[in-house]
Image: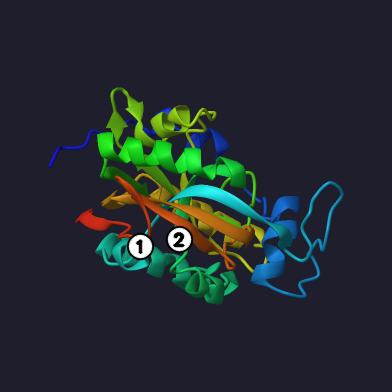
Amino acid sequence: MREPVYPDRSVFAYDASRRLYAEGEALGFDENYRLAQLPLVAPGHPLILERAPGADHLNGRYERERLSLVAPIGWEILTSGRSYREFAEELSAGSAGPKLAAGITEQRRDRLHATIAGGLQESDLPRIIEVVERFLREHGPLHLRILGPFVGRKNTGRIYLPVIPEMIRGQAAFGRLQAALGLPVTNFYAVGLFNLAEELNPAETRELSALIGNWQDEVLLETRLSSLQILGTHDDLALSGRSRADISAGTASPGHHGELLFRRERG
């Protein structure tokens, strides 16, 4: 087994996309969250946008299935380490904890993923599967690290865990795969993990910001993936998600999505 080499987080878009809150500022829900996720997280909430001009959402769902290439993240693997448990317990015990939508996290436990490429076309799936199979034959299994929490400028009610893929020939693995597919390199691959059902007041925002700052550089998990997935969904939380193809080296069928390599124990 090769020893993976990981790029510095500065290679990725996480820090540039991070939402920082000034003293006295409160975490509010942006329009995208109110349209696409809040209707699923807290049905009937007064801040929900049922629909919006130019968007095809209706109460958080859309009629046409959307297709993405994703890296599935196993719930049992992610949550098995002490560092992850300490982070999750600290988050739940904090003042923002009662405003977390715990039920949604539970519903999504078998759908956790980091998106590599979204907006795929049905007609392009055979080519995409072929390219991914070839990539995994040449480079897989793919090693990755999952870091501590991130809140961005978009979907401000959602807490993500950034993913750091290993380096392959001087480039992050997911970026190299995006380029092989003829797609833009995003340098942004994150697992959407927790959702807020209510906005935060300034004190709660300050406490959450401090927690994020304390944990954001921690490696919660190191794992490797032997397969990737074409995910179809009718909502942004993938509550309606289904696997269209589990792609490993040489096959597109149901497969094993990962194994634990390393757990960073904090302290």
Q: Which residue is mark 1?
A: 74
Q: Does dot 1 land on a helix, a strand or a loop?
A: loop
Given residues 20 and 197, the one toward you in this image is 197
Residue farthest to the left, as pictured: 1
Q: Amino acid at mark 2?
A: Leu
Judge whether 136 appears above or below 89 on screen.
above
Residue farthest to the right, as pictured: 53
Q: Which residue is mark 2?
A: 112
Q: Quadrant of residue 76?
A: bottom left
Left or right: 158 as drawn, with respect to 137? right
Q: Is residue 21 visible?
A: no
Which quadrant would the C terminus be assigned to in this image? bottom left
| Disc number for residue 196 | none
Given residues 225 and 23, the one toward you in this image is 225
Q: Residue at x 27, y 43 (%)?
A: 143
Q: Residue 107: give x, y in percent of width and height.
A: 51, 74
Q: Amino acid at mark 1?
A: Gly
Q: Residue at x 43, y 31 (%)?
A: 175
Left or right: 170 as drawn, with respect to 91? left
Q: Residue 256: give x, y in percent of width and height.
A: 30, 60
Left or right: 148 as drawn, with respect to 21? left
Given residues 121 and 69, the one toward you in this image is 121
Of the numbered discs 2 and 1, the one sitting upstream in the chain is 1
Q: Does dot 2 land on a helix, a strand or a loop?
A: loop
Query: Separation of disc 2 and disc 1 at Cα?
Result: 7 Å
Dot 2, how many residues are within 10 Å of its Cα: few (below 14), some (14-19), or many (20+)? Answer: many
Q: Residue at x 84, y 46 (%)?
A: 54
Q: Residue at x 36, y 44 (%)?
A: 217
